[in-house]
Amino acid sequence: MCESMKIYDSLTNKVFELSNKNVSIYNCGPTVYNDIHIGNARPLITFDVLQRFLKFLRFNVFYVHNITDIDDKIINQAKILKKTESEVANTYFEHYLEICNKLNILSPQQMPKVSQNILGMIEYIQKLINVHAAYVTNKGDVYFDVKNIPIYGILSHQNIEQLQEGVRKELSNDKKSPLDFVLWKKTETGLNWKSPWSVGRPGWHTECALFINKFIGDHTTIHGGGIDLKFPHHENENAQNYALFKRNIADIWMHVGHISVNEQKMAKSLGNFVLVKDLLKQYSGNDIRWFMYQSRYQNPLSYSEKLFAQSSNELWKLLEQINQGYVQAYLHKFKLINSVGVPEKDFIATLNNDLEFPNVKTIILKQVKNLANFVRAKKFDKFQKLLATIKGEFNILGIVYNNPLDNQEIKSLVDEWQKSLQQKNYLLADKYRQQLIDKKVI
């Protein structure tokens, strides 16, 4: 068993060796104004595998995954749907939980909502004001003072002057610098709360900073999310944490690459997104997970209907080989034990090296070919042992595999097929075999 894990840190651009067995993970969750697309699902699945693998390595994992249920996008969607913000947020939050269940995502230890932590955010912002890292405007907004933070830009690898070049030069009458970001927004539009400064609501960048501080401490071991969050969101989280604790908010930053459509980033704002719920009408959660494993998590991943169908077909053929073995063993009256074994050393070493998903797929595909060879040679004892190993690997990858013979309808078809073969009624046997093929069992 490995005593450590290698993870690429996108702040230092170096591989970090994770050896402390107590690991905290924070992953930025969705803004629940709509259903998630597969670009949103990629970090979700990546960090689910990370959590599963670390637990397999006997790390003590504490995983926090937030829900943003207060936002201008929710306000706008509520107007469109003619519902309250809470109704919109609660509806899409429930949809999100359903998607997580269908994707076989492990529940985090904490899944805090913004709306349930307003007081904590007000207190957090007041601390930033107290250390002169934030200022209150005459209108009642509160801004973070970027120029007081010497490490600002460390995550995006730019200094303040470089970052300012990409920001509109004109200043509002209230902001000291164009890079200053809002911590508390004065507004009576949508849901709002009383604060010492005005009636309003917290800014987006403060939410995650507060949640890490509240549920984990002055920093987290690993902070993750999509690459699009690196700047400004993660940079601004880090700045707030540095202002209060004089340290970065994370030891390791893991940023997950975009999913692109026609070489363009998939995004709801661009209208080129594919909703997970729509894919699940035709495919399984296993199919979606398997598609994500064809590329390293940091790299961009290209999506098209053709590419997704090819990936799904690859997984189906893989599972078909396993099912064939199960059925053949049953036909030969070999009693398989439904056990889960320990993954192979190569599999562990490959995941240990910063979750090398493509190489993991290659290992499993090779193993399944060996399964087929064992079936042809009627070596069902070896088939059973290797299958238990593969099941252990599936567990880490979140792939759900069910023994086809646990389904009574399928078992009855196999029994009739076996009976027909014994009676040498091959015409009837072919009929039952075709039914099993049609049901994608074999």
Image (tube, rainbow, N blue to C red):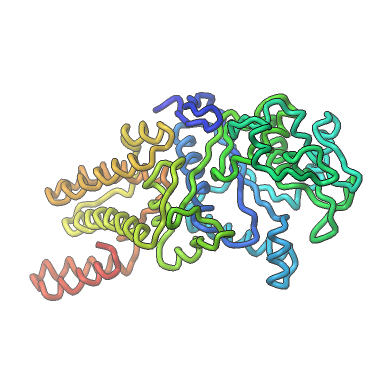
At which x and y percent is residue 289? 42, 52
Seen in the picture, residue 422 relative to 302 is either above or below; the reply is below
Q: Nearer the viewer, residue 9 or 100?
A: 9
The quadrant where residue 78 appears: bottom right
Horizontal relation, residue 416 to residue 65: left or right: left
- Residue located farthest toward the left when viewing the structure as drawn: 424
Q: Quadrant of residue 130?
A: top right
Residue 174 is left or right of residue 368, and the answer is right
Is residue 303 found left or right of 219 in the rendered image?
left
The residue at the point 78 percent across, 35 percent down is: 145
Q: Is residue 376 visible?
A: yes
User: Toward which corner of the image does residue 131 lie, by quadrant?
Assistant: top right
The structure residue drawn at horizontal position 21% and vertical position 47%, both measured from the top left corner, is 369
Residue at image point 41% right, 67% down: 282
Q: Does the rendering let one see residue 124? A: no
Is 106 rendered above or below residue 430?
A: above
Which residue is at the front of the view, 219 or 98?
A: 219
The foreground one among 20 and 280 is: 280
* x and y, in percent, of residue 147 in the image: 75, 30
Residue 31 point in image, percent of width and height: 64, 54
